[in-house]
Amino acid sequence: MKVLGIDTSNYTTSLAVVDGAAHRQAREILTVEGNECGLRQSNALFLHVKNLPRLMAELSPGVVDAVAYSSRPRAVEGSYMPCFLAGQSVAGSIAATLGVPLYAFSHQAGHIEAAVRTCGNFDFDTFLAYHLSGGTTELLLVRRDEDEGYLCDIIGKTRDISAGQLIDRIGVRLGIGFPCGAGLESAALTFDGKVARPKICTDGADCNLSGAENMIGRMIDDGVPCAEVARFTLEFVSRTVAATVSAARTSYPSLPVLFVGGVMRNSIIRSEIASCFDSVYFAEAELSRDNAVGTAYLGYKKLMKGI
């Protein structure tokens, strides 16, 4: 049985085919012009409409037995972003043409499923997940669900900007192309000195990150070298994540923590977290960032259960 997955997030057009335990994908990051730090929803929707036919031809899924797509950011009432309409339109058209089931999941559930499939031996019905990306910084209590894939309750969050926004805004200030995660990591890895211990701002499992943007901006204005600024930025994110996980662990000491989202591709942040805690799991680096693989696997599970 073969399932096509479609995910049209704010920054990536993603397609995937799952056939049993195997998957393949086609994906393209949306173009952000100049020194911009993101995309308007209208621009993202337009770029998805342009990308989808070409990526579909590249993936060449053939006849499929079901289609799954990301319909919204989170599986809660009122969660909505126009960019997901592009995937919904194509998914619905294909499913209707082939006469096959059409399954809708949240973008967040797709991230979690991609991590569950690639992080190793992970067989938990209830667990914590930390979703860190350009649009999200949320610490979640997660339960498996037959319809939605996963149901998530927020137990910790950023109170202002996301971790991904901080990384991208600092990266753009340093002249790194958007999205800036990979470039900022490369710059940080060239720094072989010691950075000052960042003073983080947390309240239990919640955090504030906008103050760091101002502080690091002053470092740039004062002429601190790019590599040192990059390292300090990633250390700030790492220590913030570690502190909020520690706070959550006081209420949920026995639950493992699964890390998902594009920020968690970063080797410096992953290494810091892994050194601080046990029972932590990470998605395969390539499937930490936005992808349709998790969405396709959710659709595959639902199809097989129905059969």
Image (cartoon, grey):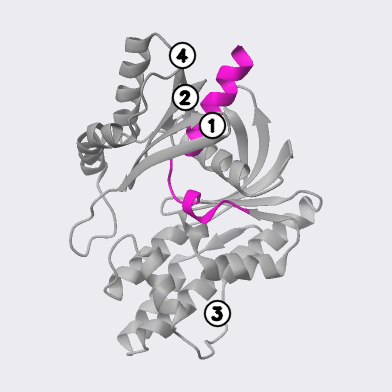
Q: Which mark is residue 3?
A: 2
276 horizontally vs 106: left or right = right
User: Any magenta on residue 292?
Assistant: yes
**Residue 9 visible in image:** no
56 horizontally vs 79: left or right = left
**Depth order, front residue of 275/138:** 275
Q: For marks 2 and 4, give the CA distance.
A: 10 Å
In the rendered structure, are the residues bearing label 1 and label 2 in contact, judged by CB atoms less than 8 Å apart? yes
| Crowd class of label 3 (few under 14; some 14 to 19; many from 20; radius 10 Å) | some
* Mark positioned earlier in the residue sequence (4 or 3): 4
Residues in magenta, as a range: 282-307
- SS at badge 1: helix
Q: Which amino acid is tagged 3? A: Pro
Q: Which mark is residue 297?
A: 1
Q: Which amino acid is tagged 2? A: Val
- SS at badge 3: loop
Circle 4 residue: 101
Name the residue: 21% across, 65% down: 35
| Crowd class of label 1 (few under 14; some 14 to 19; many from 20; radius 10 Å) | many
Q: What secondary structure predominates along the stretch shown in magenta?
A: helix
Residue 304, horizontal then vertical, whole percent: 60, 18
* Mark positioned earlier in the residue sequence (2 or 4): 2
